[in-house]
Image (cartoon, rainbow, N blue to C red):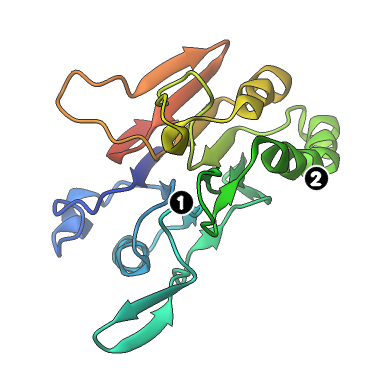
Amino acid sequence: MKVLLISDKVIEHIYSNLITERMSDIDFIISSGDLPAYYLEFIVTSLNKPLFYVMGNHDGRKIYTEKGVRSGIPEGCINLDQKIVEYNNLLLMGLEGSIKYSNGIYQYTESQMRWKIRMMEPRLYINKIFKKRYIDILVTHAPPRGIHDGEDLCHRGFDCFNNFIVKYKPKYLIHGHIHTYGTENNWLTVVNSTKVINAYGYKIIEI
């Protein structure tokens, strides 16, 4: 399966009427946050394929436009936060937001994020019993601590994501939040058997 990963930046190559020609072979889309609702809605409508997303620290529940206030929640897309969704025999789970550095809506302390994961444990163990694995893809906004993250508090990753990798062994952890530039940026790191991918801008991967 071919998957379009997007995060943090609107890409003109994608936000174009030519997207149906350029990306007709995409099977589904994953958004790791900090993207406007109109962008996600355009993609899901144009490609007519499922779009799974989590919210980022710059996302809001409301957007103020010249036409008035509209919801910041993208229509026609699937919010993965604290959910496990099965699609084409793939198990996807999401955890929204970044480390807490101000009073933003989608910001969490390390303890709060650990609690969000703990609340998912019953479903994870059910998957292990009946599906022979916990999950295949974990979608987050922030990265794991020490992998692709920054030293400043705003861009620091979560330690509990590293623990998640060790304990639940997802095939992929897809995140955003960390802006990368140039052609020699580090966007893929393998931790144990998990591929940690920074989806900043966009990436296309084969699963």
Looking at this view, is 22 or 82 the one in front?
Answer: 82
Whether residue 167 is situated above or below residue 99 in the rendered picture: above
Q: What residue type is labelled 1?
A: Gly
Q: Give the number of callouts.
A: 2
Q: How far apart are marks 1 and 2 (CA)?
A: 20 Å
Q: In which quarter of the image is the C terminus?
A: top left
Query: Which residue is outermost to the top?
Result: 192
Q: Where is residue 131 in the image (x, y as percent from the top left)?
A: 76, 34
Q: What element carries label 1?
A: loop
**Earlier residue among tags 1 and 2:** 1
Q: Residue at x 43, y 51 (%)?
A: 33
Across and down, in percent, residue 158 comes to 58, 30
Quarter occupied by residue 2 = top left
Q: Look at mark 1 in the image and give the residue it sits on.
A: 56
Q: Residue sitting at 44 percent across and 46 percent down?
A: 32
Q: Which residue lies furthest to the front in this view?
A: 102
Type of the residue with mark 2: Met
Label 2 neighbour load within 10 Å: few <14, some 14-19, many 20+: few
On screen, residue 175 versus residue 136, left or right, reads left
In the depicted structure, whether residue 95 falls above or below residue 144: below
Tell me if residue 18 comes above or below residue 121 in the rendering: below
Q: Which label is found at residue 119?
A: 2
- Mark number displayed over residue 78: none
Query: To which quarter of the image does residue 161 belong?
Result: top right
Left or right: 186, with 160 as reference point? left
